[in-house]
Amino acid sequence: MEYLIAIVLVLLSGMFSGLTLGLLSLDAQSLRRRAKHGDHEAKVVLPLRVQGNLLLTTLLLGNVTVNTTLSIFLGTLASGIVAGITATALIVVFGEIFPQAVISRYALWFGSRTAWFTQFIIILFYPIAWPIAKLLDWFLGAELPTVYSKKELMEIISEHEDSDESGIDEDEERILHGALQFSHLRVREVMTPAEQVVMFEENQTLTNEFFEAVNEHGFSRLPIYSGNRDNVVGLLFVKDLIVEDYGIAIKGTSEALDTDFLTVGANQFLDVVLTKMLKGRRHLAVVQSRKGVFLGVISLEDIIEEIIQLEIEDEDDDWEE
């Protein structure tokens, strides 16, 4: 009977020690996310884990109580030195090292299946544990959430992509990395500079040569200027030229020229410009300096390419075999 009691005490010591390390190693935010998405084990453990200081205090009180009882009990079975060595060996190996190594690795699994035990111990030690936990709550404040930087998130995504246990593939890794980085880019880093922009003067007439030039370049929207290239007065929608009269000037078109266009600054961040484009339903923005000097253009496609980290090819682009 004495050996049975000793075994039970060692098992309880291991349970307290393993649950202390295992449950408190679980991140409360991660448990909330998993519970929200239907993880039954997370739903069971979360109510215990959110009471961090109460859980810690209760498990430590239980562990100290059991270890003390075990030492005293073994002292009744053997001499002081033998009892001390035996108690130390049992507690260290079977009450600390082994259970902590096992339960910490499978913390959620063990925690969910021993939740009834943990809840019972919390109730049992509540009169002592609650005041201590409240004092810790007051002194230490709320438990700080785990917040990752963008670089850390990118590293986590890469680690998931490299793992056989994750469903994240290479394309998703590339897109997620791009989405996390594009907001740090400015318009000037992505835009097509003014000297490379295909533009036409507003007095340009719709002739065969004009249509051939438009078709050759293959753009769906073209900036139109008046007098000099810095004076952009509108955007020409190529698809709407089909309804315009042949031989008239661009400024005389009824549908193709839009004088209400979006302008952005070269130092604006891409996420800000993307929001403006989506709200205004614009696919192209004219980039100007504070003094109104034409610096270039930026398209919705340019921003999307930065997000997906891949150049978008259309039917008019030359493909390399």
Image (cartoon, rainbow, N blue to C red):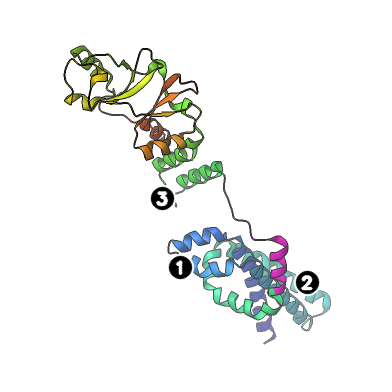
**Which kind of residue does numbered mark 1 sit on?**
His
Q: Which mark is residue 40?
A: 1
Q: Residue at x 38, y 15 (%)?
A: 229
Q: CA distance from mark 2 to mark 3?
A: 50 Å
- State which quadrant residue 313 falls in: top left
Q: CA distance from mark 3 to mark 1?
A: 20 Å
Closer mark to the observer between disc 2 and disc 3: 3
Marked residue nearer the N-terminal end (2 or 3): 2
Q: Note whether 97 is above or below 157 in the view shown.
A: below
Q: Note whether 186 is above or below 13 in the view shown.
A: above
Judge the density around disc 1: few (<14), some (14-19), many (≥20) Cα neighbours within 10 Å: few
Q: From which residue to which does the magenta span run?
A: 131-144
Judge the density around disc 3: few (<14), some (14-19), many (≥20) Cα neighbours within 10 Å: few
Q: Is residue 239 visible?
A: yes
Q: Considering depth in this image, is 73 or 239 the residue closer to the camera? A: 239
| For the residues bearing labels 2 and 3, Cβ distance under 8 angstroms | no
Q: CA distance from mark 1 to mark 2?
A: 42 Å
Q: Which mark is residue 167?
A: 3
